[in-house]
Image (tube, rainbow, N blue to C red):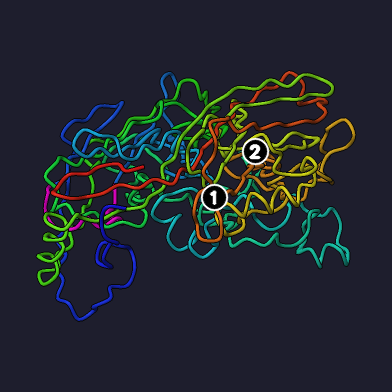
Amino acid sequence: MSGMKLPSVLQTKVIERPEVHSDVNTDLLFPVTFSQQSARFVFDRKGVLDSNSQLQISATVTQTGGPGNPLGAFYPTSVGCLSLIKRAYLEIGGRRISDLQSLGHYATWKRLHFTNEYRTGIAIPKQSGNDVIMGSSARSIEAAASATAIRARGFTEPYGVLGRVASEYATNLTELPVGEQSGDAADVHEAPKRRITDDPKTTPTFSVGLSQLIPFLKNLQLPLFAMREEVSITIEFSDPVADEAFVVPGVDEGGAAINPDNCKSEIVEDTFFIMADYLFFPSMMAEISEDILERGGYDIPFNELIHQTNYLSYTTGEFVNELQIQVGGRKVRNLIIQHQQSGLNAHYGNYNSMALKHGMRYNFKVDSVNVYGMDLENTSLQFQETSAVEGTPLMINNYLYTYKNQVDIAGVMSNLSSGLSDRLFTTYSQTLESGSQGWIGLKLENVYSQGKLLSNQPVIYTERGTVAPPDNQSSRTVRIWITIHRLLNISNGIVTLLE
């Protein structure tokens, strides 16, 4: 440690001296370079950059060869408009400080920890996405009046509410697909106003905090005024295709079938900018500047995310897969593993961590020692270990985490065994969401949030299980994010990575 601890005005918490006069200037920062592949922003070296400065983003979606009806395209339910961004990184003086790859997938993981209130009041209005997938009861109506029908409000199984705040009406195009609507106009709900359109003037815009794109900024207000080097953020966009950058329903708003392969998105350049909040503390900035320029500066601990991608195929019968995670000699805080099954063409897009129908057991070997005495097989324990990574539980229903008790011995799920509603969301049954978020996590940091210093040996992740239809011959893209404890120093206007 060569410098001092950060003062409160450079942290995202209550200022120790609230009586200090402060000022906030908000600038619209447009990219210095822009294309449909990437964009780059350069910040003015003034004030203190608020980590909750917002990136505004929007896109249009068009279909070639279609009848020209509105598509009703929308952003994947689990991640929202962040599906448009593939990668974001921060550079200071040409050195890459923070780099978040597969950003949309990682953002899904973070969003699964948002509280219902934060989702409903902030995340959905500002970032899009929708949680109607956890809606209340079934779509089907009881054939005859009965006491059961009365108790279930006239619907068939599954009954009741599954425990998440959701709106069944505000975000649905219609409750029933074309051809199944009743003649009562009250049964057909008004089309939502936030669907993606093909017109840059009418398509909705959304905003995302910079700390969601750049983990380095999560707990830091960056002192731009005391930095001599250029500070920039580069955004790389996702491929402009369906189920990645956006999602389309089965039919358009005119009832015609949609071919997702003929749909393409485009970032709207005119509404793509950063609403940068620069904070000024006149009576304290001189002291901060002196600390940085003459007294050794400040030491800033932060989390760096290392990204690794592997591919696994599953064939019928017993399987054992081992993956080496190269993190030797690093201070590791936690590991997060996603098993993405591509090409599902469901309303949540491909932002999933699809569980196997029969489940699996797994273990980690750290410094040549197994983390668990026995392979972890119980899905409740797997859920608990995964939730420990963030310190808050995954805010999802059990049916989204696993297929256990939903499938028979052949791995087939019947309509009666699924605990999810069969109501339609943009023509897709919500039962498609089953088992779609079986993430795996391992926490290695201690109670003081200090990472575990590993030897030069790789971490070994091992999974075992039995494959049966329909998982046979399937494959997964396995993404691993490793959170590393890092430290840098800002002094004399220069940033130096210490460890």
Q: Report the amino acid beneath label 2.
A: Gly
- Which residue sits at x=83%, y=24%? 318
Q: Are marks 2 and 1 in contact (CB under 8 Å)?
A: no
**Image quadrant in which you'd find residue 496:** top left
Dot 2 falls on a residue whose secondary structure is loop
Which residues fall within the magenta stretch?
44-55
Query: Residue 339: horizontal and vertical position, in percent?
Result: 62, 33
Name the image quarter holding the C terminus. top left
**Toward the viewer: 319 or 147?**
319
The answer to whether residue 278 is left or right of residue 139 is left
The first of marks 2 and 1 along the sequence is 1
**Toward the viewer: 157 or 364?**
364
- Which residue sits at x=79%, y=46%? 418
Q: Report the amino acid beneath label 1.
A: Asn
The answer to whether residue 16 is left or right of residue 181 is left
Residue topped by disc 1: 172
